[in-house]
Image (tube, rainbow, N blue to C red):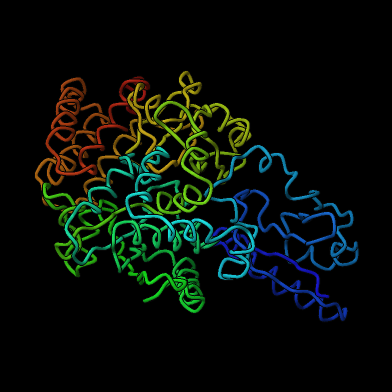
Amino acid sequence: MNIKVYVPRDATALSLGAGQVAVAIEREARSRNLQIQLIRNGSRGLFWLEPLVEVATPVGRQAYGPVGVQDVASLFDAGFLEGRAHPLHLGLTEDLKELKSQQRLTFARVGVIDPISVEDYVAHGGYEGLARALKMSPGEIVEAVTLSGLRGRGGAAFPTGIKWKTVLDQPPQQKYVTCNADEGDSGTFADRMLMEGDPLMLIEGMTIAGVAVGATQGYIYLRAEYPHAYGALNEAIAAARAAGYLGSNIRGSGKQFELEVRLGAGAYICGEETSMLESLEGKRGEVRVRPPLPAIKGLFGQPTIVNNVISLASVPVILAKGAEFYKDFGTGRSRGTIPLQLAGNTKHGGLFERAFGLTLRELVYDYGAGSASGRQIRAVQVGGPLGAYIPEAQFDTAIDYEALAAIGALLGHGGVVVFDDTVDMAGMARYAMEFCAKESCGKCTPCRIGSTRGVELMDRVIANVDRERNLQLVEELCDTLLHGSLCGLGGMTPFPVQSALKYFPEDFRKTVQ
């Protein structure tokens, strides 16, 4: 019987040498005439331990990490295939404190299974949600999603059930399910991790959505910078189709759903739902004026579900275990769990899935272990490059939609970027304007012209040219962007700028050297 050895195929693990470690383990096993089964799983999300190698033993999976190619021979010498002691031995994977304290629903299988094996997926509870959905009426499926309290995890936080109900209520016609996997926010990687580590979860969620609203075709709009996710998705789609979970007669139910992956062209604006639809249609990625809503007139003018990866991947759990089970996690109007991505100047960067209600302080210090530099943490930016900067004095804020909104911030896609006390907040405010200027689709004047003027104003402020007058103009410009932009790119650019001005005013009034 071959011993199962797990080495991640996740892009982060690969960047840290997981591919070379996998080759070295296979080579070392052959040289010692040892039979192993090497499984390329997803990452557990504890990136400071990558490459994390796991070995299946009678008492559970034993973890070793971070493993380098130079460590492989000594691991074999120490008997790591039997889970024996070694300086890199971390104990049972499930007992790692950073994993044990999480509440993994969406990421329950990531790092556990072979990502493209339908058999492995089903053995770990996969497709239970679809099996139940196939026995329910479309209205019952939509009602379950609505009752669960699931809100869009891409950043807008719009109730998913309402969006689905709108598509369901449209007259019978060609309908579509689209997944926005154009994950472009800095410090975010949850979508990529799930697509690389458990792509069948997303496929199942999209299939349930199709069954729920009568859509027969789905598209995953994937950012071009994710080649590993692209490969994993296509392999998983082929495996699901071969097993009868996609196609013209899903598991003998008479229901039809097909799915394919389309690559974006690197435009941040295509993370906005209507720009994504334009791109899917082969047009320039540009914001549409609403109404009509995509749920009524979306892809090719047809009723269309547009959801983020994590939103759709949350659906199988809701259908498998019930709306009340999912709703039991979280707080207030923020129900369920959220995969939080911690990056920047942090000692322990990674992904941590917890129910809403965890505080920023707990995330940054209990999970992140403080700054990588060892210096005092000054601020975190939550919600991507257009998220607000939150000072240390507000770190006891709960991570949920309403609590963050109450302090002028937003959760977005759940990315949290850490900055120590060396950060220049005036420079960061300038960057927000520059980012908007470079990524604007150009359709509306406030975003296209306002962001360019914003960069110019910030340059004058930093150079101390009529500083107070230009700071006043920055505030006025932010107000114009906030209320005059067609979409969230221009509309959210004021968040980092205004929060930096509010909480770190001293950085805008430094003496020019």
Q: Residue at x 48, y 34 (%)?
A: 419
| Residue 500 at x, y percent in the picture | 34, 27
Does the rendering let one see residue 504? yes
Q: Is residue 189 above or below residue 162?
A: below
Q: Is residue 111 above or below residue 469?
A: below
| Residue 226 at x, y percent in the picture | 43, 64
Q: Is residue 260 above or below residue 184?
A: below
Q: Is residue 447 above or below residue 466?
A: below
Viewport quadrant of the N terminus: bottom right
Q: Residue at x 25, y 51 (%)?
A: 272
| Residue 128 at x, y percent in the picture | 53, 58
Does the rendering let one see residue 259? no
Horizontal relation, residue 12 to residue 173: left or right: right
Quadrant position of residue 198: bottom right
Viewport quadrant of the C terminus: top left
For this rendering, which residue is in front, 363 or 474?
Answer: 363
For this rendering, which residue is in front, 488 or 220?
Answer: 220
For this rendering, which residue is in front, 283 or 463?
Answer: 283
For this rendering, which residue is in front, 5 or 26?
Answer: 5
Quadrant position of residue 425: top left
Horizontal relation, residue 359 to residue 459: left or right: right
Q: Residue at x 39, y 27 (%)?
A: 404
Horizontal relation, residue 483 to residue 380: left or right: left
Q: Residue furthest left?
A: 445
